[in-house]
Amino acid sequence: METVALVIIAATIVMGFTDSAIAEKETGVIHVGGKVLCQDCTQGWNEWAHGGNPIKGCKVSITCMDERSRVVYYGSDVTDELGQFDIIVKKFINGKKLNTKLCWVRLVSSPHPTCNILTDFAGGRRGVKLSLPATLVYRDQTEYTLGPFYFTSPLCDEPDTNDNSDDPQGTHY
């Protein structure tokens, strides 16, 4: 009888350690950070490419998909006065590990009155995949540093000059 009780106690202890180990593995987070700047095309090349001003209040989003191309996570952050954002995502969504290679980070909007046109300089308009190596991996935290992403003014926006041969009469806008 004492042997049965000892076996039950031992099994309970082992199961308790296993459950806590599983719960511990599911507590990790991913930080995705970077900067959003305003590009001024009226400046010389060096100032245009390297002298952007930070924009406060820009929205940056992350969208993560599963293997069947379904959205499993969407989140966003707003930049601070230095133009920096930090999106925090749990490594486990609905009990499944998030595949960061299926996550995209992109610009959403800018509150700036003149610097509010999305650019693809550093991939902000089309989005950047988190497939690149992480900047930091420590215990249960992984960190990606992206960008900087850029907005520009309507004056600097390049018009779409693609020849749409699918529409020879030009009836589709």
Image (cartoon, helix red, strand yellow):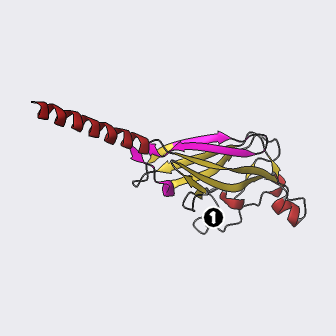
Q: Quadrant of residue 93?
A: top left
Q: Position of residue 119 (x, y in %)?
A: 72, 56
Q: Residue at x 25, y 35 (%)?
A: 12
Residue that lies at the very extreme toward the left in this rendered image: 1
Question: Label 1 belongs to which residue?
Answer: 169
Extent of the magenta region: 74-102
**Other residues around mark 1 within 10 Å, as few (<14) / some (14–19) / many (≥20):** few
Foreground: 125 or 100? Answer: 100
Instruction: Give left or right: position of 93 versus 62.
Output: left
Say if the magenta span includes residue 92.
Answer: yes
Tell whether 22 sits left or right of 116. Answer: left
What number of labels is visible? 1
Residue at left offset 57%, top offset 62%:
133
Amino acid type of the residue tagged 1 in the rendering: Gln
Question: Relative to the observer, which residue lies in front, 165 or 89?
Answer: 89
> In this orientation, which residue lies closer to the viewer: 21 or 167?
21
Residue 149 sits inside the magenta stretch: no
Image location (x, y in percent) of residue 173: 64, 55
Residue sitting at x 81%, y 62% = 49
**Relative side of 78 to 96, left or right:** right
Q: Is residue 25 left or right of residue 126?
A: left
Q: Position of residue 137 (x, y in %)?
A: 56, 54
Q: Secondary structure at mark 1?
A: loop
In the rendered image, the residue lying farthest to the front is 2
- Residue 120 percent location from the top left of the image: 69, 59
Q: In the image, what residue occupies the spot 50% across and 54% down?
A: 100
Q: Nearer the viewer, residue 10 or 123?
A: 10
Q: Quadrant of the N terminus?
A: top left
- Looking at the image, the residue that sits furthest to the right is 43
